[in-house]
Image: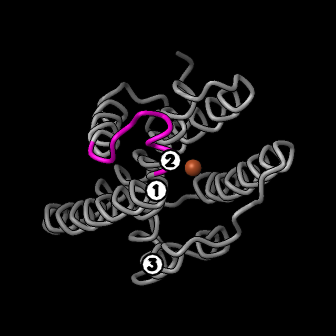
């Protein structure tokens, strides 16, 4: 995705935004390595593939960069909620610490996504803006529902062990999306990080 963003003609992606996407993708790779190390340290196998992976990959590749970013944003909402649930409910402090750190990064990723989509809409011609918002928003919600369902089902044993029902997880995702999308921005209109 970093390569696609680097070559993209999307006006919402200026040079620093493209660099941010590159770092964003790199950070996701770091998360995967950290989780892999954590599982290995616990003597647990690392799952390389999940049955929902193909669906997720297909939905990312279907339409191009903007819908792909929306798919990743939906995954961030579910990921942020998932790590928050693990961080607050798992009894092992080491696992909780890793989940808290990764969850914090996911929240920042969502902040970046919010900033990107704000730019996408701002840079669209006013006449197409409502339709673009409707299409991207609908796509985001469809993928979000699919991601919530797949994580709720795929990790049901973990959620049951943590005393979280699938519907409760879905509700927590919606609650987290609302909280993260309404909190004050930490990136200003130039893309610079605000000191809060
Ligand atoms: Fe992320």
Q: Tags 2 and 1 in contact by the CB under 8 Å rule?
A: yes
Q: Please say whether residue 163 is one of the residues in the magenta stretch.
A: yes
Mark drawn on residue 75? 1
Q: Nearer the viewer, residue 128 or 50?
A: 50
Q: Earlier in the sequence, mark 2 or mark 3?
A: 3
Q: Is label 2 in a helix, a strand or a loop?
A: helix
Q: Is mark 2 within 8 Å of ligand 1?
A: yes
The residue that label 2 is drawn on is 79
**Mark-to-mark CA distance, 3 and 1:** 12 Å
Q: Which residue is at 58% across, 54% downward?
A: 17
Residue 111 visible from this viewpoint? no
Left or right of 150? Residue 190 is right
Some atom of ligand 1 lies within 8 Å of the CB belonging to the residue at label 1? yes
Name the residue located 24 percent from the left edge and 60 percent from the top edge: 137
Note whether 38 is above or below 64 in the view shown.
Answer: above
Q: Which residues are magenta?
A: 157-167
């Amino acid at each position: 995705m970093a390569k696609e963003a680097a070559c993209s003609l999307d006006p919402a992606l200026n040079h620093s935004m493209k660099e941010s996407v590159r770092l964003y993708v790199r950070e996701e790779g770091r998360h995967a390595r950290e989780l892999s190390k954590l599982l290995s340290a616990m003597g647990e196998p690392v799952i390389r593939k999940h049955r929902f992976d193909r669906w997720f990959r297909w939905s990312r590749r279907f339409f191009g960069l903007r819908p792909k970013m929306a798919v990743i944003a939906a995954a961030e909402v579910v990921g942020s909620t998932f790590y928050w649930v693990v961080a607050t409910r798992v009894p092992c402090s080491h696992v909780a610490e890793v989940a808290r750190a990764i969850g914090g990064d996911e929240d920042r990723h969502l902040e970046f996504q919010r900033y990107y989509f704000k730019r996408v809409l701002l840079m669209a011609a006013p006449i197409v803006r409502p339709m673009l918002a409707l299409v991207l928003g609908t796509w985001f919600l469809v993928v979000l529902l699919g991601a919530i369902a797949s994580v709720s089902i795929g990790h049901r044993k973990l959620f049951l062990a943590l005393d979280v029902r699938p519907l409760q997880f879905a509700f927590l995702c919606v609650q987290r999306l609302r909280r993260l999308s309404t909190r004050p921005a930490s990136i200003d209109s130039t893309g610079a990080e605000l000191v809060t």
